[in-house]
Amino acid sequence: MSKKTAKPPAKKSPAKKPPKKPPAKTQAKSAAKKKPKQPARKPGPTLAESADKFALYQRSVQSPTVDIEFFDAEFQKHRSRVPLSVREDFCGTALFSAEWCKSDPRRTALGVDLDGPTLDWGRANTLAAAPPDAAERVTLAQTDVRDTSLPAVDLIVAMNFSYCIFKTREELREYFAAACKNLVDDGVFALEVYGGTEAVVALSDERELRGGLTYVWEQEKFNPINHHTLCHITWKFRDGSQLYRAFTYDWRLWTLPELGELLQEAGFSAVKFYFERVEADDEDDEYMTGTGEFVEHTEIENQEAWLGYVVALK
Ligand SMILES: C[S@@+](CC[C@H](N)C(=O)[O-])C[C@H]1O[C@@H](n2cnc3c(N)ncnc32)[C@H](O)[C@@H]1O
């Protein structure tokens, strides 16, 4: 199963190279094609007006079962035991926490987020939809991820690059040190990372989802001096309506060496980098497809777009 992330479609299968140029036939056809008539607008709310941005977010960018499979295997490889307690930092609507508790009846999850209404949505939707025995093993805490008073856990995860909200080395190191402190002695911390030559340019990328829905990842700005980037998520609907910039991210795009160095400075004993294994899906190697299997690397090709995990061992 491939992984969804809060990024453009190219990053969903990071090593998939786009065709050098669109096939000529398609170009000619689309140029000649008449603009389709807009369907007459039905009375009542538009699809965008009746959409729920949190439900769309979960559907478009989160794949917790894929993440859990990876974390489970890596934790067991390094620690020779099954991880049971997780802390989901920047948990938002707590989808990862719910899936974690569904994956094993011994598992517990602590979701941490600053935003009360987002956590409320998670309680009323994500947890309400989970089997009660799993939902009752999820605790949600409205606090800062740098809070050092939280209980110690086996595994802390920060998915979908939310740590990029911290824009200085001091802030990020403080967060990493708090995570290190709140792990058990053989605990593991995992971050999701993205990058590549396309991550440092302004762009807008669309991915078609089922039901005539389009997910749009927009990188509005990137400043090469400080790596600050301003990104947005928009959804477009088949009736022509849209949820324009439903989510905005004002981030610093951290580089892998910066992350590795700060994790070590914060007290982690080892830092590992994982990227998706790819294979050629045509004879001349022009197209590479991600296999969904994440493997530790010390060197990767400088791709247009890559996705990975950084795993730090306490
Ligand atoms: C993009 S959402 C992450 C959703 C989900 N975890 C995921 O994997 O996609 C980012 C969340 O981080 C929260 N957040 C931002 N700064 C935070 C902080 N310092 N401590 C805790 N939560 C924070 C926001 O309230 C928001 O819900």
Image (spheres, rainbow, N blue to C red):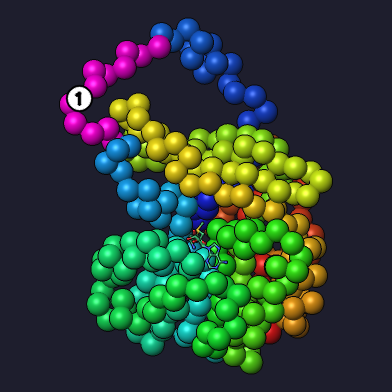
Can residue 68 be seen at all in this image of the molecule?
Answer: no
Say which residue appears at 70% left-offset and 53% top-offset: 253
| Callout 1 secondary element | loop
Could you say where residue 127 lies in the image, as x and y percent from the top left?
31, 69
**Farthest residue, direction bottom:** 185
Could you say where residue 74 lies in the image, as x and y percent from the top left?
60, 76
Can residue 290 be seen at all in this image of the molecule?
Answer: yes
Residue 100 in which image quadrant: bottom left
- For the C terminus, which image quadrant? bottom right
Say which residue appears at 33% left-offset and 37% top-offset: 48
Q: Amino acid at mark 1?
A: Lys
Q: 210 or 52, which lies in front?
A: 52
Q: Residues within 10 Å of mark 1 (few under 14, many from 20)?
A: few
Q: Is residue 290 left or right of residue 195?
A: left
Residue 182 in which image quadrant: bottom right
Part of the protein shown in magenta: 35-47
Per the image, the residue denoted by label 1 is 42
